[in-house]
Image (cartoon, rainbow, N blue to C red):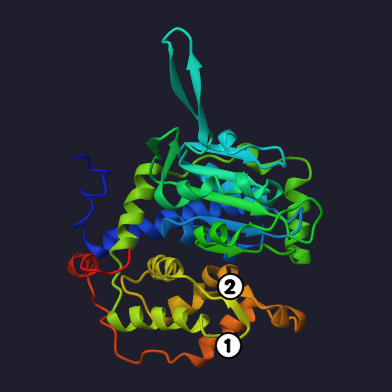
Amino acid sequence: MTPGSPSANSHAPVDQILGELHGAVQRIAANVERVLVGKPDVVRLALVTLLAEGHLLVEDVPGVGKTSLAKALARSIDCTVSRVQFTPDLLPSDITGSSIYNRQENDFEFRPGPIFANIVVGDEINRASPKTQSALLECMEEHQVTVDANTYPLGSPFMVIATQNPIEMEGTYALPEAQRDRFTTRLSIGYPDPAAELAMVDEHAGHNPLDDLRPVSDAAQVLRLIEAVRRVHLSPEVRRYAVELVSATRRLPELRLGASPRSTLHLVRAARAQAALAGRDFVVPDDIHAIAIPVLAHRLVMTAEAQAARRSPAELIRALLQRVPVPTAALDPNAAFVRSMSNNNAGTPR
């Protein structure tokens, strides 16, 4: 057993695990913020998604740093990285790979596509056709690719960071509901404030900071941090609260489609990561509140009437957070990772 493996770290003291996580996250965040100036909350949510073993969808207008965020996060981790520029003529095999006939061997051999990397940056994903977008479904959910009846596993860690332009913009296709549901979180970067934009002009006008970005973490450390997040304690009360919150979206008259059971799993995984980043080894309702909108909003399908009334999914989730009763049962602040690990393995969503 190697010292850097997740198993070797599984019984390390809780302070040591949280210390390593906090230090690594700070280094990665500082590295990314050299490129994306003035957006610490955006960077933090991206790191929550990484530690929750999820995939990130970055949606915003052109020019606000969507691709820069994805590239900076990918370069900050010493993992294999690939980038795919989605275009209308892109084919599914351009992403997953294809079988090529080898004349010397008189047989077909598989040539892996760019999806075979730890961090996959998909730029302007909604400029490709729905058929090509669907090539990512199996990859994102099952961490494998099936080509010509053969299944090929993907590496670990594995994360897709996709950017998309608003669907109102020319040359875009709306992502299918099944595709959106695979993304753990969606975020919008937004325009920087004047001070941050001025700092960006001063620092970036004559030089691209991405050129000097160096890794500050590696795949082995990321796997250790992910293992630590899996072991964050999730009490039955908080678990029930997450289920009730997601279930409530399915009863809203403003929605044609509420959040799926997959979104419940993503919600509790992200809440565990949020708690770990806050230095806690247990989840509290505030962790659910902090990530509810990024995790749930992009999965909801509004009715035509709600759209005409200019209601937004984020607005509906804020209202639910006010209505769904928050558990008041006391949480155990001393819940140790090692002790909670056996409880979490017994049916707790991971």
Write the residue at 34% across / 43% down: 220
- Secondary structure beneath dot 2 equals loop
Relative to 106, say whether 275 is above or below: below
Q: Which residue is mark 2?
A: 300
Q: Residue at x 62, y 77 (%)?
A: 314
Q: Secondary structure at mark 1?
A: helix
**Marks 1, 2: nearer the viewer:** 2
Quarter placement of the C terminus: bottom left
Disc 1 marks which residue? Answer: 319
Q: Name which residue type carries label 1.
A: Ala
Residue drawn 50% across and 75% down? 290
- How packed is label 1: few (under 14 Cα within 10 Å), some, or many (20 or more)? few
Q: Residue at x 59, y 68 (%)?
A: 298
Coordinates of residue 99 in the picture (x, y in percent): 49, 25
Amino acid type of the residue tagged 2 in the rendering: Leu
Image location of residue 163, percent across then percent down: 64, 52
Specify the quadrant that holds the N terminus: top left
Q: Nearer the viewer, residue 228 or 135?
A: 135
